[in-house]
Amino acid sequence: MKKNLIAGIACLSLSVTSGAPLAVLAQPIQISATDNGQTTLHPLSSDVAVIAHRGASAYGPEHTLAAYKQAMTMKADYVEFDIQMTKDGQLVAMHDETLARTTNAKELYPDRAPWRVKDFTLDEISRLDAGSWFNKAYPDKAKTQYIGQHVPTLEEAIEFVKQHGNGKVGLYMETKAPSVYPGMEEKLIEVLKKNNVLDDEKLFLESFSEESLRKLKNLVPQVKLVQLYTSKMLAGKDVYRELKRISDYAAGVGPSKELVVPKFMEAAHQNQLLVHPWTVNSQDDLVSLLSLGVDGEFTNNTDLLVDLLEKPFISHGVASGDVTDSSAILWARTNEAAKVQFEISTDSNFKHDTIVKTSRADVKHDYTVNVTVTGLKPDTTYFYRGHAISSNYTVNGSFKTAPEENSLKPITMVWGGDTGGQGEIPPFNSFNAMAAINPDFFLFSGDTIYADNKTPAVPNPPSVTVEDFWAKYKENRTDAGLRSLLQKTGTYAIWDDHEVINDFSGPSQPLTPTGLRAFKDYWPMSSERSTEDKLYHKYSWGNSMDMIILNNRGYRSPNTQNDGADKTMLGVEQLEWLKQQLLTSDAKVKLVATSVPISVPTGKAMARDGWANGNQVNSNDPTGYENEFKKISDFIIEKGIKNVFFVTTDVHFADIIKYDANQDGKTDYNELISGPIGAIKINPPTLDPTFGPERLYAEGNFNNFGVFRIDPSNKEATVEIRDENGKIHFSHSYQLEN
């Protein structure tokens, strides 16, 4: 596989058919050249809406004219009003059903507890101070102009936004507790008609009450309605069925932010429902939801979302990888073409000895960048931060360099794979559990995406264009746990079959160059590995461990070819390189990172995908790659190479195996298998007996990952298999041989 085989970029566009719920759309959506045309993780609307939650309520007292004006000054697209109704049937802008929290009602009316809005007339409410509480609660944001701010009527609020928004700022109104206020919907429509906004394109009415929304639909069918959701409201429901059901009256959904995951986005966008999550205030959360393709966001921090939408920004986190004792690769992705800057330092405040690196994110690589940092100190924790130079949004990360040559330091690594397959899509719990261990590094052992499986990013698989493959990586990067792990420690990523298509053989699969291109774009990868697409390399962690990363896909003969002297998985050059690395390594542990197992039969009959031919299943199956692995096994035994551990995932269960290939009663090498992180879960089958395997542990039907620790001082290595919540299911220690 050579670089010139990699296919070029195809520019795509997607037209969204405007139905009744989406009449607001002024034009078809033009998908970026870096998006696949079928993705559901992309806004339906032509512009992502900035919805000022109760006004710019992070900067001024909510639901006051001052907060509304601040929101419009900050370029909000919509100002949101929560609606309550007074004792005398007037609508006012107020979030709570009571006046106690945001006014001085307790002081002015001490005997009127619990100060419910419905128990007060508009005249009584108009006497209240709705701003001074904010100055007391947030003294750093206090302003004298907030003192004496009043509770606006809905009519007053509408007129204020029309006057100060120059007709460009929309209205977003929620019927709060409509069951408490009979006739609220009719009164609302009356006010909207009176103020000539009932037919405005930039008008949304929202509610948690389906009954209220259906009533509004019957009264004013042309108005766009948004069904709000809490987590409790969706508990136990099939989100696809639920959102299809409500699409007969709703034009959009307003979920609490934690509900917004790829499945939710797919369910909404397949039903042409806009997605406006609430309440999103941190820039990290704002960016996370933008990466999922939301159509707008409710936020107290109007300016933060506006800044993100007006300038390029880091859209899918940062990562470090292929770390050595003196270098590392830093990775980031922006949402559009931009110059990216990284700062790297041993000081988390970046005040001393800071290295600065820049790179250009362009469409050719889906706006991803890989930056090489050299001249680092061994066994040192480095902090880094990246940002698109025009943006104020910064993303931080850290990694630890490998120990210096010949040193013996303890190591903790985590490994896993099989992520995003067979309908399992983000969020994945295992990544948070991995991050909690504070590992020295993460080995992502293959199947880092499932390019050939249906997901919201590629609803019509398999992935074919490079945009499809890119979309898969972006989809998995929407997982907050994965981003957190990648930002916390260095990563070594290897590929397996699903980065292209199931059980593929690199040279014979037409999609290989496209899948490989996307894989290299989305992982921090050194030039030593990416040059000429070789991908295999050795990384040393002092004298404690040599990690030998294999490329099990790029050089293999077709799976269907009969096994024999001329059949190969690694290719002649890589096989000889592997032997040389094993022979010359003086590290305590030789860790061979392989994407396929030794004795677990994989693939299909007559087309075995791993080394084993599965003759315990079918004695007449001539496929597999046992002839080649025997060369590796014999070499390890003949040369007396000790403490060899093959580490993999691929098979969707956990398995810890020792091998006595020459049947002399001694362990020749070990195999450590974990997984899946997020894919189909199966039970362990019978092992192929060729190389003398003996199981120490096997367990299936659960999401899991592996932990491997090396303690040189005690000449000990330990393996753990943990479930997605971090609970240890198995632990075993190995005494390292001299």
Image (tube, rainbow, N blue to C red):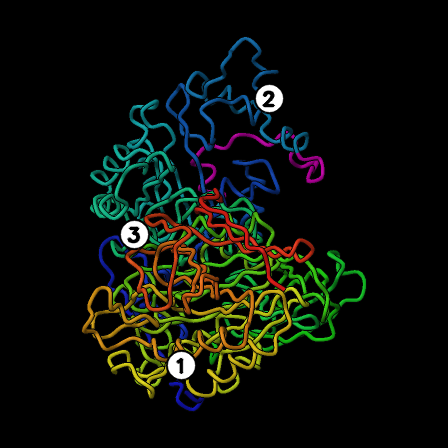
Of the pair 712 and 679, the residue shown nearer to us: 712
* Residue 414 coordinates in the image, percent (x, y): 53, 56
Instruction: Say whether marks 2 and 3 touch (CB < 8 Å).
Output: no
Label 3 secondary element: loop
* Amino acid type assigned to the residue bearing label 2 in the image: Asn
Give, as a three-letter code, the residue at label 1: Gly
Residue 94 visible at all: yes
Residue visible at 35% across and 39% down? 229
| Discs 3, 1 touching: Cβ within 8 Å | no
Residue at mark 1:
554
Q: For residue 396, what is the image quadrant?
A: bottom right
Q: Is residue 219 above or below residue 656?
A: above
Residue beneath disc 3:
683
**Residue name at image x 34 percent, y 86 percent:** 565
Residues 111 and 395: in front is 395
For disc 1, the neighbor class at 10 Å (few under 14, some 14 to 19, many from 20) is: many
Tag in front: 3 or 1: 3
Q: For the C terminus, give its image quadrant.
A: bottom right
Q: Nearer the viewer, residue 569 or 476?
A: 569
Between the C-alphas of marks 2 and 1, the distance is: 71 Å
Does the magenta run of residues contain 154?
yes
Left/right placement of residue 354 relative to residue 136 reads right
Give the magenta-colored segment's residue range.
138-160
Select label 2 or label 3 by which is in front. 3
> Is residue 414 depicted above or below 219 in this figure?
below
- Residue 414 magenta-highlighted: no
Q: Which residue is mark 2?
A: 104
